[in-house]
Image: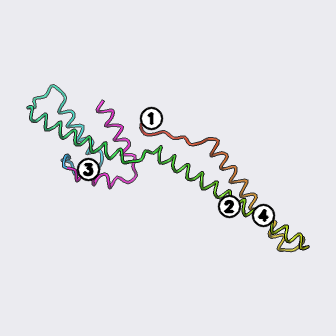
C-alpha cells in the first residue's frame, strides 16, 4: 500500500516540468539526508527507510521509532508537495475552458465587425457608390470576415463536440 501511494505521488511530482522549487524544498527539509538534484534520490531514501522497518529486522525500539518518525516526516513532505501541484487534468481543463471562452469572445467580436461592414456597405450603396473601389474593398473585407467567422465556428463546434478529455496521473 505504501509503495502504491508513494508511486502515485512520485508520478505526480516527476510529471512537473520545473522541479527546481520542489528539489529546493526537499534539500532544505531536515528529514532528508539526501542532497541531490534528482527527485528519484529522495524517493529512494524514503523507500530504503520503509524497507528497514519491514520485519524481520534487528532494530531496537528506539531505532524503529526514529525511522518511523523520519518516514512519517518524509511522507508528509511528499504529500504536501503533491497536494500543491495542480493535477494535469485540472490544469488542462482550466486551459480548455479559457481557450473556449476566448474563442467565443473572438467570435462575438468578428460578428460585430461583420455588422459594421454591412452597415458601411449599406451606407455606400444608399449613397450611390455601388461600383466604387471603396465598396469593393469593403465587400472583400466583409467576405474575409465571414470566412474567419465560419472557420472559428467550425473550430468551436469541433472543440465543443469532443469536449474536454484527459486522464489524470492517478487514473492510470
Which residue position holds label 3? 26
Q: Earlier in the sequence, mark 4 or mark 1?
A: 4
Which residue position holds label 2? 109
In three-dimensional space, the C-alpha distance between marks 4 and 3, rounded to whole angstroms, equals 59 Å
Q: Is residue 144 left or right of residue 63?
A: right
Q: Is residue 2 left or right of residue 130?
A: left
Q: Is residue 44 left or right of residue 169?
A: left
What number is the disc on residue 171? 1
Furthest-right residue in this view: 128
Relative image position of residue 54 (x, y in whole percent): 19, 29
Residues shaded magenta:
1-29
Q: Earlier in the sequence, mark 1 or mark 2?
A: 2
Q: Magenta segment, principal secondary structure?
A: helix
What number is the disc on residue 49? none
Which residue position holds label 4? 142
Q: Earlier in the sequence, mark 4 or mark 3?
A: 3
- For numbered disc 1, what is the local secondary structure? helix
Residue at the image position 62 percent from the left and 46 percent from the top: 159
Relative image position of residue 72 (x, y in whole percent): 22, 39
Decide whether residue 155 is among the magenta residues: no
In three-dimensional space, the C-alpha distance between marks 1 and 3, rounded to whole angstroms, equals 26 Å
Relative image position of residue 157 (x, y in whole percent): 67, 46
Indicate whether 103 appears above or below 72: below
In three-dimensional space, the C-alpha distance between marks 2 and 4, rounded to whole angstroms, equals 13 Å
Residue at the image position 33 percent from the left and 32 percent from the top: 4
Judged by depth in the image, the label closer to the viewer, 1 or 2, is: 2
Amino acid at each position: 500500500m505504501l509503495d502504491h501511494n508513494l508511486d502515485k505521488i512520485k508520478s505526480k511530482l516527476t510529471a512537473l516540468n520545473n522541479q527546481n522549487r520542489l528539489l529546493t524544498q526537499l534539500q532544505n527539509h531536515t528529514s532528508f539526508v539526501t542532497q541531490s538534484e534528482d527527485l528519484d534520490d529522495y524517493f529512494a531514501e524514503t523507500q530504503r527507510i520503509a524497507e528497514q522497518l519491514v520485519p524481520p529486522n534487528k532494530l531496537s525500539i528506539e531505532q524503529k521509532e526514529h525511522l518511523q518518525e523520519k518516514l512519517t516526516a518524509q511522507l508528509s513532505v511528499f504529500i504536501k508537495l503533491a497536494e500543491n501541484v495542480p493535477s494535469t487534468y485540472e490544469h488542462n481543463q482550466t486551459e480548455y475552458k479559457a481557450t473556449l471562452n476566448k474563442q467565443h469572445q473572438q467570435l462575438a467580436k468578428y460578428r460585430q465587425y461583420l455588422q459594421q461592414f454591412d452597415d458601411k456597405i449599406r451606407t455606400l450603396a444608399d449613397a450611390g457608390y455601388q461600383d466604387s473601389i471603396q465598396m469593393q474593398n469593403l465587400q472583400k473585407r466583409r467576405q474575409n470576415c465571414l470566412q474567419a467567422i465560419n472557420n472559428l465556428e467550425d473550430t468551436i463546434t469541433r472543440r465543443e463536440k469532443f469536449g474536454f478529455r484527459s486522464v489524470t496521473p492517478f487514473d492510470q
